C-alpha cells in the first residue's frame, strides 16, 4: 500500500468530491486543500462551508486559503482565469512542500480534456495543444483524466454523496462553457463516441509528442556548435528545419513568425540580420567559416573601467583583466592567444581605460600601416551584430586604442628590437561559482 501523503484539491464540485472519495477508498494518506477566490459572492462561501463539512465528516485534514483574485489580476494585468490559476498552483506547491506531500492531485477529467483540445484547435495549436491536459505534470497528478463526467456523477449517486454546482458553469459567458453546452453536444449528435474518440486521439498524440521530444533533443545536439550557435547547414539538413528552429527559439522568447523570418534570412545568407525577443537577440553570423544563428541575452551597454596601473582587475560578469609588466629577455615569447595582448610598455601611457567601442573609433591593426575604422575592421572579419555590441577596447591616456580586445593589438605598440619591457594584458572570463 502507498504510504506517501497526497494533497487533494477540492472545490466542492462533483469532480473533486469524487477524487477525494476515490483516494480514501484506495487507502491513500490524503489532506485536502480548498481555495476561496471570492469571485461568486455568497456562492463562494457556500462552497467553502460544504467542503469544511465534508472533510469533517470524512476525517480528512483541510487547508483553506482566501484570495483577492480581482486585485491580483488587476495588479499583474492578467485575466481572472489566469490569476486564479497562478494563485492556486503557487499555493498548492508551497503547501505540498510545507506538509511533505508527495504530489498534488487535481480532478480534471476526460470531458475537461476534450474541451481543452477543441479550444486549442480553434485558437490554433501545435502538437502540444493537441495532446491536451497532461496526466502528470511535475508534482501535479490527474487520476481522473480518463474518467468521464457522466461516470463521476454515477459514482457519486451510488455512494449517495452530494456536491455543489458552480453556477457559472451553467452560463455561456465563458468560451469553455460554449464548447461544453453547444459544440460537444453537436459533435456527439454526429457520433455518440465523439468525446471518447477525441480524448483517445489526444492520448495518442501525447505519446507521439514524447517521441518527437526525444528526436528534437537529439537534433538540438547535432545543430548546436556551442550553447549559443546553430550551424545553418546542419539545421537545413534536418527533416523539418522550420519545426526544429521553432522548438529551439521557444527557449529564447521568439514567435513562430520571427522564426520563419530568421530561417529565410539564414537560408539566403543575410549575414548581419538581427531579431529581437523580449529577452534575447538573434543574428545571422559567420563563425569559424560556418554560417550560424547566434543567440545572446539582451544586456545593458558594457561598462567602462579605469585601469590606473598594472595589477589584477576583477570586473562585472566574471570578467577579469590582468595587467603585468615584464622585462624582455632572450627567452621572451609573445603569446599567440587572442585573449592576450603583448605590447611595448614604453609606448603606452597610463592610466588605461577599458570601454565599449564608439562610432568613429580608429586604430592601426597589428601588421598594417595607417589607421582603420574599428567598425570597418569588424566588418572585414565578419563580426556578428551581437559580438559588435559586446566588443571592448583598451585605450591609453592619450586616447590611442592599444587593443581591440580579443582580436588585434595596435601596431604602434608592437614589440620590436628596441623594446626592453612589455605590458601583457590577459583577459579571462570566470564561470559563476
Image: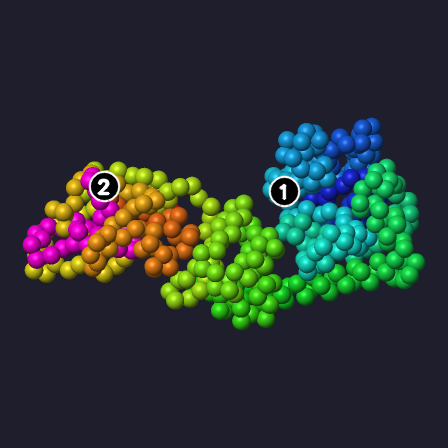
x and y percentages locating residue 252 in the rendered image: 53, 52
Q: Assign a secondary structure to mark 1.
A: helix
The mark lying in front, picked from 2 and 1, is: 2
Is 370 included in the stretch rendered in magenta? no
Residue shown at the point (16%, 41%) measured from the top left: 349
Residue denoted by label 1: 93
Give the spatial CA distance, label 2 vs label 1: 57 Å
| Residue 217 image point, x, y percent | 55, 64
On the image, the x and y values in percent for residue 75 come to 64, 31
Of the pair 188 and 396, the residue shown nearer to us = 396
**Neighbours of disc 1 within 10 Å: few (<14), some (14-19), many (20+):** some
Q: Which residues are magenta?
A: 396-425
In primary-sequence order, the first of circles 2 and 1 is 1
Left or right placement of residue 200 versus residue 349 in this view: right
Which residue shows up at 20% across the image and 39% down it?
Answer: 397
Q: Badge 2 local density, few (<14 within 10 Å), some, or many (20+)?
A: few
Reply above or below: 284 against 160.
Answer: below
- Residue drawn at x 33%, y 43% is 358
Q: What residue lies at 88% left-to-right and 43% top-to-bottom?
A: 161
Q: Is residue 228 left or right of residue 106?
A: left
Nearest the camera: 126 or 205?
A: 126
Q: Which residue is mark 2?
A: 399
The quadrant holding residue 135 is bottom right
Residue 415 among those drawn in magenta = yes
Displayed quadrant of residue 247: bottom right
Amino acid at each position: 500500500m502507498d504510504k506517501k501523503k497526497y494533497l487533494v484539491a477540492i472545490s466542492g464540485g462533483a469532480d473533486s468530491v469524487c477524487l477525494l472519495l476515490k483516494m480514501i477508498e484506495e487507502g491513500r494518506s490524503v489532506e485536502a486543500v480548498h481555495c476561496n477566490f471570492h469571485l461568486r459572492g455568497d456562492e463562494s462561501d457556500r462552497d467553502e462551508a460544504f467542503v469544511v463539512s465534508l472533510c469533517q465528516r470524512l476525517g480528512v485534514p483541510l487547508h483553506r486559503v482566501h484570495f483577492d483574485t480581482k486585485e491580483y489580476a488587476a495588479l499583474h494585468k492578467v485575466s481572472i482565469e489566469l490569476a486564479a490559476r497562478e494563485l492556486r498552483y503557487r499555493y498548492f506547491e508551497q503547501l505540498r512542500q510545507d506538509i511533505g506531500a508527495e504530489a498534488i492531485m487535481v480532478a480534471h477529467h476526460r470531458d475537461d480534456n476534450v474541451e481543452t483540445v477543441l479550444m486549442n484547435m480553434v485558437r490554433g495549436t501545435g502538437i502540444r495543444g493537441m495532446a491536451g491536459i497532461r496526466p502528470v505534470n511535475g508534482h501535479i497528478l490527474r487520476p481522473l483524466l480518463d474518467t468521464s463526467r457522466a461516470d463521476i456523477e454515477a459514482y457519486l449517486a451510488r455512494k449517495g454523496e452530494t456536491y455543489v454546482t458552480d453556477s457559472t458553469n451553467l452560463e455561456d459567458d465563458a468560451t469553455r462553457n460554449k464548447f461544453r453546452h453547444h459544440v460537444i453536444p453537436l459533435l456527439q449528435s454526429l457520433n455518440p463516441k465523439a468525446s471518447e474518440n477525441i480524448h483517445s486521439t489526444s492520448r495518442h498524440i501525447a505519446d507521439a509528442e514524447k517521441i518527437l521530444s526525444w528526436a528534437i533533443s537529439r537534433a538540438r545536439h547535432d545543430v548546436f556548435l556551442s550553447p549559443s550557435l546553430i550551424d545553418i547547414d546542419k539545421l537545413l539538413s534536418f527533416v523539418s528545419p522550420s519545426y526544429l528552429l521553432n522548438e529551439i527559439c521557444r527557449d529564447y522568447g521568439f514567435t513562430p513568425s520571427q522564426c520563419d523570418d530568421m530561417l529565410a534570412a539564414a537560408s539566403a545568407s543575410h549575414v548581419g540580420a538581427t531579431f529581437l525577443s523580449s529577452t534575447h537577440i538573434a543574428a545571422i553570423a559567420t563563425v569559424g567559416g560556418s554560417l550560424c544563428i547566434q543567440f545572446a541575452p539582451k544586456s545593458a551597454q558594457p561598462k567602462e573601467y579605469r585601469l590606473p596601473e598594472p595589477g589584477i582587475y576583477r570586473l562585472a560578469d566574471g570578467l577579469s583583466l590582468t595587467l603585468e609588466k615584464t622585462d624582455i629577455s632572450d627567452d621572451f615569447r609573445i603569446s599567440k592567444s587572442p585573449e592576450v595582448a603583448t605590447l611595448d610598455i614604453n609606448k603606452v601611457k597610463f592610466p588605461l581605460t577599458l570601454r565599449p567601442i564608439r562610432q568613429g573609433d580608429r586604430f592601426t591593426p597589428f601588421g598594417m600601416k595607417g589607421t582603420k575604422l574599428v567598425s570597418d575592421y569588424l566588418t572585414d572579419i565578419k563580426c556578428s551584430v551581437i559580438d559588435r555590441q559586446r566588443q571592448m577596447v583598451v585605450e591609453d591616456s592619450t586616447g590611442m586604442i592599444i587593443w581591440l580586445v580579443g582580436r588585434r593589438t595596435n601596431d604602434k605598440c608592437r614589440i620590436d628590437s628596441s623594446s626592453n619591457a612589455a605590458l601583457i594584458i590577459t583577459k579571462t572570463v570566470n564561470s559563476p561559482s
